[in-house]
Image (cartoon, rainbow, N blue to C red):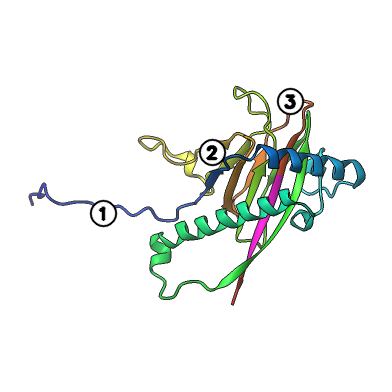
Amino acid sequence: MATSPNHQLQITPAFPTLIGRMQVAGAEVTNEQLAALVLERERTSPSHDHANFGGWHSRADLLDWPGDAVARLRGWITEALQQVVQASAQLPESQARTAPPRGAFNVSAWANVARRGNYHRMHNHPSSAWSGCYYVTGAGSEDSLAGVLEFYDPRPFTEMVEVPGTPYGQRMLIRPVPGLLVMFPSWLYHFVHPMASDTPRISIAFNATWRPS
């Protein structure tokens, strides 16, 4: 049976994993203020260790800290959440729903300070919808993996079969740049490579838990 040259294969990107990056413009002064706040807390408060190996991990109450810098950060996180929800609504899986989601996010955040040899083990963020990270400072050379955030393809065994173009089983690297906000699904496993500098890498991580109304 002859095949018509006009036949078209319909392609649907099923099971996508959305990762957002937002570079905040004009964040230099806010970053200086946030760095001062975080380093002062590090000096006076114990570390609440979770996935971090070494370094300092604050309590998850950072968005309650006083100051305009924290208020601006809260606004950037809210803006990023709104955009990622809008992007999710465009996915085929969301389009199939009959009613839009109704509810609100409860957001918590904490600071991380890492220096030479410190890193974060592979982990995810249970019980949250979206998680993210805002970089107050960077991590040095672009030629090194030091301080780099790494995501793996969440689909198991995809790297075991050769596929033209090798689209599966890849890793995604995000280098810490001051003012960069990263957003990702909380179930996505990730880790941070060890630091190679004594200059602190200061980041603020956050969880957004969805509360349906």
Against 9, is 33 above or below? above
Against 193, is 2 above or below? below
SS state under label 3: loop
In this picture, residue 164 sits left or right of residue 50: left
Name the residue: 75% across, 41% down. Answer: 33
Query: On residue 142, which mark appears?
Result: none
The answer to which of 122 and 131 lies nearer the viewer is: 131
The amino acid at mark 2 is: Met
* Label 2 – label 3 distance at C-alpha: 20 Å
Mark 1: few/some/many CA within 10 Å (<14, 14-19, 20+):
few
Residue at the spot of label 3: 196
In this picture, residue 46 sits left or right of residue 127: right
Are the residues tagged 1 and 3 within 8 Å (C-beta)?
no
The answer to which of 133 and 38 lies nearer the viewer is: 38
The answer to which of 191 and 197 lies nearer the viewer is: 197
Q: Nearer the viewer, mark 1 or mark 3?
A: 3
Residue at the spot of label 1: 10
Q: Is residue 174 visible?
A: yes
Asked if residue 207 is among those painted magenta in the image, a careful observer would answer yes
The range drawn in magenta is 204-210
Residue at the spot of label 2: 172
SS state under label 2: strand
